[in-house]
Amino acid sequence: MSFSSWPERKALRYVVTMAPKAPPLNGNWQDDSWADARVGSVGSFHPQSTVHRPRTQFRVMHSGDVLYVIFRVEDQFVRSRRVAFQEHVSDDSCVEFFARPRPDRGYFNFEINCGGTMLLYYIEDPTREGRAFVRYTAVEEKVAHAVRIFHSMPKEVNPEVETPVTWIIQYEIPLVLFEAYVGAIGKLGGQSWTANFFKCGEMTSHPHWASWSPIGEELNFHQPQFFGSLEFEGESG
C-alpha cells in the first residue's frame, strides 16, 4: 500500500486552537493556558478489549511552529516496563498520537507509555511484516530528543498498579521534526492534517485498545484511511 492509495476518509474533526502562550510542561490539565483547547475523547474501544475501559482525554494546541499535546487518563491495571527509546511501549499502559502532515507523504506515530518512554517512526507504507512495516524509518534518537515530554508516573511501573490511578502525558513537538522527513510545511495556522489518538495496554492484565476516530473491525491502529481531521486555527482563530 502506498500513500497514494490511502482513502481520504475523515471520520472526525478536531480543531487545534492557537496557544495564547506555551503551556508549562508540568502536566497540569487544568492550567489556564489550556482553557481554550478543545477536549477530545479516546472512547472507541475495539471489541477485542477486555472490560477495562479507561477514560482517556486529550487536548492539542499550536504556536505556529510547535504542537502542544496533553493526555489525561483515568486508568487502572497500569504498568510500564519498556524504558528504552524505540521499545514497543504499546505493550504497556500507553497513549498514542498518529499525525500525517501532508496528504502526499507518510505519517508519524508518537507512542508514549505512562512512564514517558517513546517509540517514534515515520511510516510510508503501513503494510505489516511481523511487527514491522514494509516502508518506515525509525526516527533517530538525536532527532526525537526535540520532543520534550512530561510524565506523571515513574519511568518504570512494575509490578502493575491494580488500583485506580489518573496519569498524565504532556509533550511538545517542534515543526522541524516533521519537516526533517516530509519537507517544508510552513506555519500551522490554516492547515489541515489527518490524525488519530489512541490508548492501549496490550500486555497489561486487562488488555484494551481505544481510538478517537474508530478503526473498523481490524485490530490495527495503523490504518490511515480511518484518521480524522486536524484543523489548525490561525492567530485570529
Image (cartoon, rainbow, N blue to C red):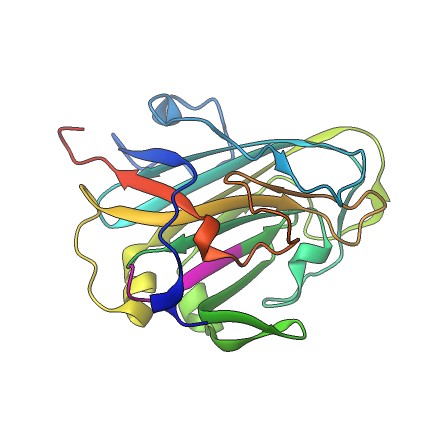
For the C terminus, the quadrant is: top left
- In the displayed structure, 92 sits above or below 17; it is below
Task: Residue 209 in the image: state x and y as whole percent.
Answer: 67, 45
Q: Residue 35's image quarter?
A: top left
Residue stretch in magenta:
103-110
Picture coordinates of residue 150, whole percent (x, y):
52, 45
Residue shown at 61%/57% (left/top)? 117
> What is the x, y in percent for residue 10?
38, 43
Taking 95 as reference, is 183 left or right?
left
| Viewer-closest of 56 and 48 | 48
- In which image quadrant can residue 129 be found? bottom right
Magenta stretch encompasses residue 127: no
Q: Quadrant of residue 85?
A: bottom right
Q: Is residue 112 left or right of residue 159?
A: left
Q: Residue at x 44, y 65 (%)?
A: 144
Residue at 78 percent across and 28 percent down: it is: 164
Q: Is residue 211 left or right of residue 54?
A: left
Task: Count the labels in the image.
Answer: 0
Identity of the residue furthest to the left in this view: 236
Q: Is residue 24 above or below residue 177?
A: above
Apparent side of residue 44 relative to residue 52 in the rendered image (left or right): left
